[in-house]
Structures are given as C-alpha cells and as structure tokens.
Image (cartoon, rainbow, N blue to C red):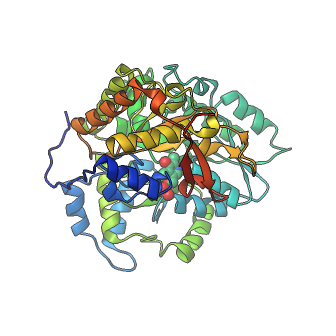
C-alpha cells in the first residue's frame, strides 16, 4: 500500500467526449498544446509533476532567501555531498541547465560523447557544444519483449572499441544515464557501471552520471542484481555516484521537486570553469537559479526518494498497471520499470503504417476515450520525411509512454487507464492514422500539427 495518506487534494477535470473531440481538433492532435484543465489523468511526464510531502513543504517554509550564502544552500549542499561524495556541487534550475554548463566547460568541439543512451535534451546540449553524441546500448535492449534485467546497460565491447580508437575520433566523456530514459526506462547494473568506470580509468576519459532516476535505478539493482539484495537503495546510489567523476541531475525526477537540478564534480578546475558559467547564466553559486525554499525542498526530497517503502510502492503500482495492460492483450516494454510504462502501439495497431504514426493514433485515442494524456515515442518523435511527406526514416518501434508522476495517482486512477486501453484493444481497427500538416525543424514533437487520415494507406 502507499506509505502515506492524503492531506491536501486537488480536483481533477472531467470532460465529455464532444469536449475532448473539440479540444484535440483545436490543438491539431498535438497533446502538448492541450490545456491541463482539459486532461483528466496526465501521464505526459514524470518530470516536476510529483507530490511534495508535508516535510518538504515545511522545509520550504524555512527557506532562507538571502542572495548569497543562504542557510538553505548549506543545508542542501550537505545532503547532496553525503549522497554523492563529490567535493564540488553547483545548483541549477533544472537538468538541462546542468547539461549546458557542464558540456560547454568540459567538451572540446569535434570530440564525441559515448553513452548507454542520451536523453533528448542531453543529446541536444552535446551537439550545441559542437560534439557528437553516440549511443551504445547493449544488444539485449533491442528485444522489447525479453525480460533481461538490465537492458539499460552500455555495450562494453563497443565502448572499449570506441575508446581504443579514440586517436581517430577523440572521446571527451562517457555518460551513463540511470535509469536509461531514452531506452525504455531500463536500469543499468552496478556491474556494468563498475566495468564502464574501469574502462574510463584505463583510457583516462571522464565518466559522468546522468542521475535523474538514481534512486529508481538503485531500487531495481537491489531487486535484480546478484550480490545487492542485502543493500539499501541508498547504499547502492552512494556506490554509483562514487564510481564516477561527476554527475548532472534533474531533481524534477528523483529529487521529487517541481523545479531544480545540480552538477556534482570531483575535478576542482572543471568545477571552477562551470562556476563561471553558472554565475553568468543561472545565478550566484549558492542559488543557481533556484529559490532558497526550492533548495530546502530538494534536500528533503533527495532523502525521501531512497526510502524503501516509497520505492517498493512505486514499483508495485507500475507493476500493477503493467499487469492490467498485459491482461487486456496489450504489450508493454518488458520488464516493467518504475517511472513509466512503454506501450507497444505498433503491435496493437498493425494496420496503421509507421508514417501514419500508430503511437500518435494511440495517444489521441487514449485522450478521446479516457481524457488521458500520454506521449508518443515512435516515428513522430524519431522519424523523418521528405518535403512531400514520404518517409525517409522510421523509428525502430512505435511506442507510447505512460509516465507515472510520483505520489500523485492512486490505483483507481490507474484502473481507469487500464480500462481505457482494454476498450481500445477490443476494437483496434476503429483507430486510424494521422498525417503531418505542420512542423518545426528541431524537436518537432513539441509543436507538430496533424490531421486524421480516414482510411489507412
Ligand atoms: C529530464 C531529464 C533530463 C533533463 O532534465 P530537465 O530537468 O528536464 O531539464 C536529462 N536527462 C534525463 C535522463 C532526464 O530524464
């Protein structure tokens, strides 16, 4: 059961089918443009959408808003130092600010960054620094149905090969994303992290952790990795941070706050370069774009997030929803993780070709039938077409991500999601595809405009 009870509530909007049809048409079938008060269950993102605890709220009330040297900063820094072990810690307003500051200080143009999988903003910030971002996911990640426990791992042989050939193509850093968000939210094993760290040491390349979901990764390690069953998630997380040269963190995920992030580093010269940029673009080094209350709430969230009862319930509710979806005959990416479920829309809607976006079709149908907002991760997100709209590149899989906000929805909310999906699975042929009628050149999924295709093909 949930290891908390509800003290403050927020009403959720209920809408009628005609209202949802009108809303979806108005936003040209792009759920990012829906107003939140048109959405009943919002599974668009787990980022900054969690519920804060009474202790976090109380900590926030105690925030010190001094411009420099606030008490909040020193309290927060102590918590982050104890968790991560890094001597240099810089606050930022969210994860991508940490990425931009670290990458522009660390990366030389023309080099590359190797990763298990870069998250989309992480890739964008590597490229903005004039570098190439290469993903080296392990082979097991390609099979969506396999229940291999650590599909978030990096391919160690490919990593070693790239490091060995770094004289031809220099490698500026190795970035490990835990859990692997771009790769279906799958965890990375401690063994894989240890071996990656050994390779980085051997070839003298810095290893950076993208730690947005460090606690969820640690939980899955305690459940799935031999030798870690008797450790606490907190101990596993501490070990992971200490293997690396630094981290970037989006505290909107496993900080359980609405805004916040940080950079952690071992190297003092690199930390000094980052500090200069931090002051110029985020704020002074003791607040980095955050209010004192945000720092205090993050400090508390970083302690709550590794509590076993919290993580056990988070895993349990995700497993419960996954089981109900499977029972309805719909496949999810296996094994189910914690922060999101990835529904195999391509398999559910085989009559819709990739360039008519089966993922988008399912996203729209979930909204029309159930007022549920979700995100496409398929050929709309990753594909490309020529000017006439003919496909050049399609995604390897057509997925829909149901992100699970922390401590927000209860089992009956998730029953509604499962029931809505089950209804669609009874009559998948009634769902039709979409075509693009307007898009922007970068990160197009945020601003895309679509219209329905009435008869498939
Ligand atoms: C969310 C996220 C980021 C970016 O963080 P923001 O706080 O959204 O800027 C980076 N990496 C991963 C793995 C993420 O999930």
Does residue 455 sit above or below 368 in this rendering? above
Percent of width and height locating residue 62: 22, 69
User: How many dots with numbers?
Assistant: 0
Does residue 66 sit above or below 310 in this rendering? below
Q: Nearer the viewer, residue 387 or 1?
A: 387
User: Residue at coordinates 82% horizontally, 38% vertically from top-left?
Assistant: 165
Residue furthest bottom as drawn: 67
Answer left or right for 428 relative to 52.
Answer: right
Percent of width and height locating residue 235: 38, 37
Percent of width and height locating residue 187: 48, 33
Does residue 32 sit above or below 344 in this rendering? below
Locate the N terminus and report the quarter of the image it occupies: top left
Percent of width and height locating residue 147: 48, 20
Asked whether residue 198 is in view, the answer is yes
Residue furthest front as drawn: 455
Answer left or right for 133 relative to 296.
Answer: right
User: Residue at coordinates 66% horizontally, 55% vertically from top-left?
Assistant: 126
Does residue 246 sit above or below 233 in this rendering? below
Q: Nearer the viewer, residue 290 or 404?
A: 404
Answer left or right for 58 relative to 331.
Answer: left
Residue furthest right as drawn: 168
The image quadrant of residue 199 is top right
The image quadrant of residue 105 is bottom right
Q: Nearer the viewer, residue 258 or 410?
A: 410
Locate the C terminus and report the quarter of the image it occupies: top right
Asked whether residue 236 is in view, the answer is no
User: Residue at coordinates 45% horizontally, 52% vertically from top-left?
Assistant: 31
């Amino acid at each position: 059961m949930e290891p908390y009870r509800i003290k403050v509530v927020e009403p959720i909007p209920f809408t009628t089918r005609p209202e949802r049809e009108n809303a979806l048409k108005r936003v040209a079938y792009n759920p990012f443009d829906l107003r939140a008060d048109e959405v009943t269950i919002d599974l668009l993102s787990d980022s900054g959408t969690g519920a804060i605890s009474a202790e976090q709220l109380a900590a926030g009330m105690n925030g010190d808003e001094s411009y420099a040297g606030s008490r909040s900063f020193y309290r927060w820094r102590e918590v982050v130092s104890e968790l991560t072990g890094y001597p240099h810690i810089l606050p930022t307003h969210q994860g991508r600010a940490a990425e931009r500051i670290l990458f522009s200080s660390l990366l030389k143009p023309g080099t590359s960054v190797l990763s298990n999988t870069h998250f989309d903003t992480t890739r964008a910030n590597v490229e903005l620094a004039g570098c190439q971002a290469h993903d080296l996911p392990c082979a097991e990640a390609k099979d969506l149905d396999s229940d291999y426990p650590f599909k978030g791992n990096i391919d160690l042989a490919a990593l070693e090969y790239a490091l060995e050939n770094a004289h031809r193509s220099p490698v500026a850093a190795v970035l490990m994303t835990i859990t692997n968000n771009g790769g279906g939210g799958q965890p990375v094993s401690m063994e894989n992290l240890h071996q990656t760290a050994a390779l980085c040491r051997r070839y003298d390349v810095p290893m950076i952790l993208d730690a947005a979901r460090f606690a969820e990764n640690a939980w899955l390690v305690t459940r799935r990795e031999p030798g870690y069953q008797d450790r606490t998630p907190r101990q596993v997380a501490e070990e992971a941070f200490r293997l690396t040269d630094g981290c970037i963190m989006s505290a909107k995920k496993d900080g359980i706050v609405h805004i916040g992030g940080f950079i952690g580093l071992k190297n003092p010269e690199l930390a000094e370069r980052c500090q200069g940029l931090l002051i110029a673009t985020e704020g002074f080094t003791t607040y980095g774009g955050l209010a004192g209350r945000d720092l205090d709430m993050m400090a508390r969230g970083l302690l709550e997030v590794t509590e076993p009862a919290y993580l056990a319930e988070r895993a349990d509710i995700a497993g419960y929803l996954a089981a109900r979806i499977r029972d309805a005959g719909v496949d999810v990416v296996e094994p189910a993780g914690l922060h999101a479920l990835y529904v195999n829309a391509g398999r559910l809607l085989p009559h819709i070709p990739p360039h008519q976006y089966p993922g988008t079709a399912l996203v729209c149908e979930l909204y029309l039938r159930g007022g549920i907002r979700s995100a496409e991760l398929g050929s709309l997100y990753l594909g490309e077409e020529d000017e006439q709209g003919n496909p050049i590149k399609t995604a390897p899989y057509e997925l829909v991500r149901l992100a699970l906000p922390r401590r927000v929805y209860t089992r009956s909310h998730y029953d509604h999601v499962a029931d809505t999906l089950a209804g669609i699975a009874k009559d998948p042929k009634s769902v039709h595809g979409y075509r693009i009628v307007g898009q922007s050149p970068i990160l197009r999924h945020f601003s895309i405009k679509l219209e329905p295709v009435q008869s498939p093909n």
